């Protein structure tokens, strides 16, 4: 028997639930399909739990520096990882249950807990039932990419998902990643060899960032006792008694690091390999991402792909914006497009990096005449008062149009401050909108006008 709906939403990451709610409110009968955890990566193994862990780490960091602030704390500052994990689980679990309750409470909605596989363009099987709808929205997200490293089958390793089960302080982390920020273990080595599945070795810690930004992030991590090995020619893994050995050069066995635990953070792959997309006639790229147009429509009429599975962004905020674009076009007669948005993201080390728009390298490659301004966080009063002066600010503007082209704010509250510039970029206003503004003292944002008053030609 086939159960018919007006719309089917597959996956409950950031785009799916909000879209299901809008469709339901519009009077459509909606089926919501979730195969595992409600809320997707962000709620269960990404944003919410990891930032909760960072909050605990920051509390320890401040406690250990208490004397610098004139605060006396008797005894040793320790970490109870079981309590840290319990706090993380409670906060993430609250969000998970909230999403599930929201979906199960939809007026015109029906929730299916199971794996959806297409049997045709409008038809799919979930458990033992056949569902059919004129509109289908795919929001299945992604998962950690497991690289085919020699010897990996011989060792136990962690990913962003299994990392959430850690309730102890590992003695010595090994992390294979483009960039890594780790919790207060005794020591960590970050290995940077390949970016995702590229065959090129990484010349710096964060290849997508400008050299000065990457170098500053590396300096911050090294100040925490993290050893970073760049330009690994070839990574291998193996065991030495109870230890994990990571080789950095297949031609030189002496180039290796040894630790107690290995974290793989080398990229993501979309959860599209077991959806039966071929039976729906859907096109994907060579990595399995679903091809979509500027309004997130697939090549099959009536099917959209949102979130991490469409390669239009790999962030919670881009996934939610995908929902907004689809809903605007379908329900609001508002022709929004993916290309309307300005790329922005944060790297949540401590202090964080807030990024918006083009990098300096991208501006140079474009051939534009540009101006640039930088300022060390050590020259920001708020950072000095907090005793957190690592990092710097950088803004690049078009010399002719005065438009802000890009910004990097690495430092205390950098992930918040960058939005001041981002909103001006969306407004298509000149940089003078900020440089002539009066901001509140003492804040980090207060230095943005001062920063922009010091623009100089980009050499």
Image (cartoon, rainbow, N blue to C red):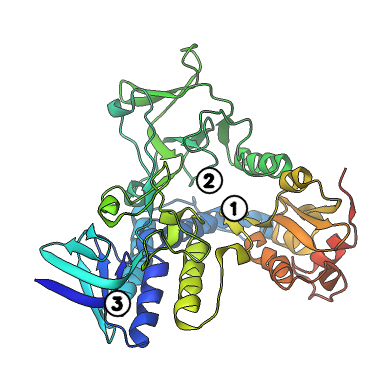
Q: Which x, y percent locates residue 452?
A: 85, 62
In the image, what residue occupies the spot 44% across and 55% down? 310
The residue singled out by tag 3 in the image is: 103
The residue singled out by tag 1 in the image is: 350
SS at badge 1: loop
Q: Is residue 148 left or right of residue 257?
A: left
* On screen, residue 140 above or below 192: below
The residue singled out by tag 2 in the image is: 181
State which quarter of the image contains the N terminus: bottom left
* On screen, residue 108 above or below 149: below
Mark 2 burial class by Cα count in 10 Å: few <14, some 14-19, many 20+: many
Label pair 3/2, CB-CB below 8 angstroms:
no
Residue 74 in view (yes/no)? no
Distance from disc 3 to disc 2, alpha carbons, whole Å, reads 34 Å
Please state the total of marks drawn on the protein image: 3
Mark toward the start of the polypeptide (1 vs 2) = 2
Mark toward the start of the polypeptide (3 vs 2) = 3
Distance from disc 1 to disc 2, alpha carbons, whole Å, reads 8 Å
In front: label 3 or label 1: 3
Mark toward the start of the polypeptide (3 vs 1) = 3
State which quarter of the image contains the C terminus: top right
């Amino acid at each position: 028997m086939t159960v018919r709906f007006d719309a089917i939403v597959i996956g409950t990451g950031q785009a799916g639930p909000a879209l299901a709610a809008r469709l339901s409110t519009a009077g459509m009968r909606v089926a919501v399909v979730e195969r595992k955890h409600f809320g997707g990566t962000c709620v269960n193994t990404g944003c919410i739990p990891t930032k909760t862990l960072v909050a605990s780490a920051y509390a320890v960091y401040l406690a250990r520096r208490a004397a610098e602030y004139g605060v006396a704390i008797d005894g040793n500052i320790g970490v109870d990882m079981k309590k840290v994990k319990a706090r993380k689980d409670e906060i993430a679990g609250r969000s998970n249950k909230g999403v599930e309750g929201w979906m199960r409470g939809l007026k015109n909605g029906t929730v299916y807990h199971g794996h959806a596989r297409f049997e045709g363009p409008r038809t799919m099987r979930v458990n033992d039932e056949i569902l059919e709808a004129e509109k289908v929205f795919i929001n299945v997200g992604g998962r950690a990419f497991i690289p085919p490293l020699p010897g990996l089958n011989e060792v136990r390793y962690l990913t962003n998902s299994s990392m959430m089960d850690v309730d102890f302080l590992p003695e010595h982390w090994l992390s294979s990643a483009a960039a890594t920020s780790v919790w207060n273990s005794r020591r960590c080595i970050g290995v940077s060899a390949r970016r995702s599945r590229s065959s090129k070795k990484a010349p710096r810690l964060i290849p997508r960032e400008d050299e000065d930004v990457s170098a500053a992030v590396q300096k911050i991590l090294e100040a925490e006792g993290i050893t970073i090995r760049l330009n690994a020619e070839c990574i291998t893994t193996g065991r030495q008694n109870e230890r994990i050995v990571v080789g950095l050069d297949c031609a030189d066995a002496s180039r290796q690091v040894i630790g107690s635990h290995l974290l793989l953070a080398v990229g993501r792959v979309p959860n599209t390999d077991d959806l039966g997309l071929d039976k729906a006639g859907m096109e994907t790229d060579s990595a399995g991402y679903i091809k979509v147009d500027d309004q997130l429509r697939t090549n099959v009429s009536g099917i959209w792909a949102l979130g991490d599975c469409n390669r239009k962004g790999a962030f919670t905020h881009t996934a939610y914006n995908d929902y907004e674009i689809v809903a605007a076009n379908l329900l609001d007669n508002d022709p929004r497009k993916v290309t309307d948005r300005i790329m922005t993201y944060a790297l949540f080390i401590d202090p964080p990096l807030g990024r918006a728009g083009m990098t300096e390298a991208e501006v140079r490659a474009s051939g534009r005449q540009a101006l640039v301004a930088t300022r060390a966080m050590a020259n920001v009063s708020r950072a000095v008062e907090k005793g957190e002066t690592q990092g710097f600010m950088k803004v690049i503007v078009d010399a002719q149009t005065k438009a802000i082209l890009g910004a990097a704010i690495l430092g205390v509250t950098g992930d918040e401050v960058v939005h001041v510039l981002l909103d001006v970029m969306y407004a298509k206003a000149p940089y003078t909108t900020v440089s002539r503004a009066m901001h509140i003292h003492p804040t980090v944002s207060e230095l943005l006008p001062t920063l922009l008053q010091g623009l100089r030609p980009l050499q």
